[in-house]
Image: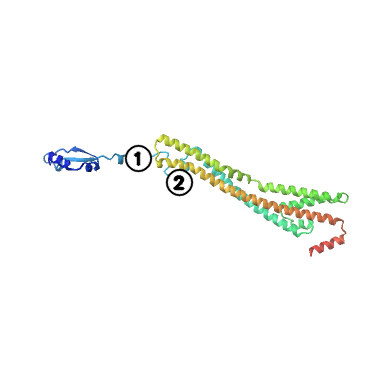
Amino acid sequence: MSSLSLIGCLALVPASALAEQPTTAVVPHATPAFGADQPASPSGIEPIFAAPAVAELSEAADVSREDRPHNLSPLGMFMAADWVVKAVMLSLAFASLVTWTVWLAKTLQLVGARVRATRGLKAILKAHTLEGAMAEMAGRGGVVVSMLRSAGDEIRLSDAAFDWAGGAGVKERVASALARIEARAGRHISKGTGVLATIGSTAPFVGLFGTVWGIMNAFIGISESQTTNLAVVAPGIAEALLATAIGLVAAIPAVIIYNVFARSVTGYRQLLGDAAAGIERLVSRDLDYRKVPNGVKNAAVALAAE
């Protein structure tokens, strides 16, 4: 086709149709030498399509950051985090380990202490004299046994002065000794629960500090890379948020376990209070029967036993 025919065909095409067509560049096709195997193009031109957008997308797809973790699991995000965030995560993990260790140790301690206190309380309520309660609990241990022994020792030490001073002072001294044993036992059983309150109140803020530090580093990385691509920005933010998640994992069980232990310790101290009150009743009864003739005393004991 001649050049004049090509120009005439282009003139017949509307301007709007030409505007809708993609931009192309044409180059003249060289006439092959005589005897070449490939025939020349009928039109003598060859289109070359320019695709700058596709090239930019492929270049963006090839961009990779060395600080972006390939593994976005919790372990992978931990390994790719900043050293400050790593230190926060490790401290929170240690706090969680302490929480569960205290839970196991105090649970075993509380269960054993409640069993011994319940057994001692039953023996005190069943006995009619202090000696009978001590005989029932012979060979056993626990706080209630210590209360019985303390009351028996105080009566034995005050026996010589009873005929002159009466039994009011003995009762006061026994009550004072039992109160101190009860308070000491309460402090002993509560030891270690304070760390749970500390972990429960501070762990969320420690995790928040790690999150703030990590997000600050992520924003610095965004400014340095000069890109807002989500694939580049998201890993750093996810690493920062992982610190807050670990802080909540450490804090929530600590608060729950502390509240459970607080109620259990209160119940245990109530058992000890009931046991102390029972021992005081036994001591008061024994002191009142000291001036009663043996015949009347034996009859009263036999009647109570029935």
Give amino acid for label 1: Ala
Of residues 115 and 200, which is closer to you in this image? 200
Q: Residue at x 73, y 53 (%)?
A: 145
Give me the disc on residue 60.
Answer: 1
The image shows residue 16 at horizontal and vertical percentages of 23, 42
Disc 2 vs disc 1: which is toward the camera?
1
Residue at 55% from the left image edge and 46% from the top image edge: 250
Residue 87 visible somewhere in the drawing: no
Q: Is residue 94 left or right of residue 123?
A: left
Tell me the residue that label 2 is attached to.
73
Q: Residue at left 85%, top 56%? A: 290
Q: Secondary structure at mark 2?
A: loop
- Horizontal relation, residue 241 to residue 230: left or right: right
Mark 2 to mark 1 CA distance (whole Å):
24 Å
Q: Is residue 101 left or right of residue 161?
A: left
Q: Residue furthest top?
A: 224
How many marks overall?
2
Residue at point 41%, 40% (across, down): 232
Q: Earlier in the sequence, mark 2 or mark 1?
A: 1
- Residue 148 screen position, x and y as percent: 76, 53
> Which amino acid type is shown beneath numbered disc 2?
Ser
Whether residue 150 is visible, yes or no, is: yes
Residue 119 position, x and y percent, is 70, 57
User: At numbered mark 1, what does the secondary structure look like: helix, strand or loop?
Assistant: helix
Is label 2 in contact with label 1 (beta carbons under 8 Å)?
no
Q: In terms of image quadrants, where is residue 3?
A: top left
